[in-house]
Image: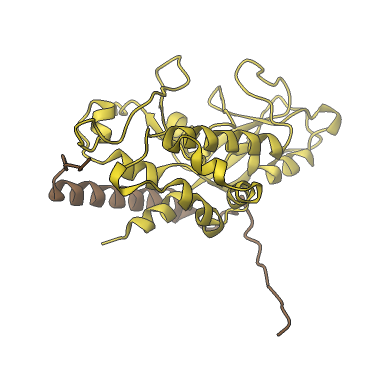
Amino acid sequence: QSMSLSVSPAQTAAWRRQIFEQLSERTKREMDDFRHYEQAIEQSVWVKKGTM
Amino acid sequence: MADDKDVLRDVWFGRIPTCFLLNQDEVTEREAEPYYLLLPRVSYLTLVTDKVKKHFHKVIRTDDAEEMWFEYEGTPLKWHYPIGVLFDLHASNTVLPWSITVHFKNFPERDLLHCPSHSVIEAHFMSSIKEADALKHKSQVVNDMQKKDHKQLWMGLQNDKFDQFWAMNRKLMEYPTEDGGFRFIPFRIYQTLSDRPFIQKQFRPVSPEGHVHTLGDLLKEVYPTPLQWLSEHLSHPDSFLHICVIPVPSD
């Protein structure tokens, strides 16, 4: 079954850009002033040691 | 122009700055300081608040401490909903940080599920993934995975390991090109002004005539984003697309 596109390339570019912008705005709004807060999940650093 | 993969990262690394305050009715041995944390939007409250529990346990009498639960402006917060859903649904119009009240008594049995350990959250998370895969691929992908693969999804979420999670989740997001998308889109629509917890129904990403369905088709609004793309990129780690419908602020 072939797919017919009901959304034009211009519309696709528009919704994609809108989502990128909205996510970016959300990050700015929710995180920019709070980067000094402690993270709930600590990022452990793993050092993998192996013998050659 | 940003890449679609950047969206996956933005969704995963979304954080809500939160201030935890002890309920004023709790009996304390000294004043309880608030506790500030950046909560991952895609995780679960009871999975990321061990530090909060430890912090408040220092000031309350341990004999008085029952199961910890959370409330925002009188609403008990369901730990089994993703944190981002809880925030968007109940507090998206609030000033940040999000102020959550912490309780250690009077557990609201009618509103919340008990969460005695992380394994309860794991079971809930895996059951969501399995339900979603039943809708997307008739359970074929999740059934073909090994126990260690399921564990990798869970450990990826628990330890905030994006690459570890997506190395496996990629398989849950694949579909045959000729199908044009998943069988059905796993989604839930939450409404603040409704007694129903959420709306969930079977909805295909492509019409019988081969037209791609958009979010607008689903919500009966004009919003020309293919559901398949939303499901692949904006789904929570539990594989569901969680959609919150909130009233527009009147001010």
Q: Nearer the viewer, residue B20 or B200?
A: B200
Above or below for B92 versus A37? above
Q: Residue furthest front?
A: A1
- A12 relative position to B205: left or right: left
The chain coloured yellow in the image: B
- Is residue B180 visible in this depiction of the protein? no
Q: Which chain is brown?
A: A
- Tell me where residue B80 sits by quadrant: top right
Q: Residue at 42%, 37% (x, y): give it.
A: B136
Tell me if I can see residue B3 in this picture: yes
Instruction: Say whether residue B121 is left or right of residue B176.
Output: right
Q: Position of residue B67 (x, y in %)?
A: 74, 29
Residue at the bottom extreme, as displayed: A52
Q: Quadrant of the N terminus of chain B?
A: bottom left
Residue B203, position in %: x, y? Answer: 34, 28
Residue A44: horizontal and vertical position, in percent? 66, 62
Classify B226 as above or below B64.
below
Residue at (25%, 41%) from the top-left corner? B225
Residue nearest the viewer, comparing B49 with B161: B161
Vertically, is B218 above or below B226?
above
Q: Residue furthest right?
A: B63
Which image quarter holds the C terminus of chain B?
top left
Q: Position of residue B59 (x, y in %)?
A: 78, 38
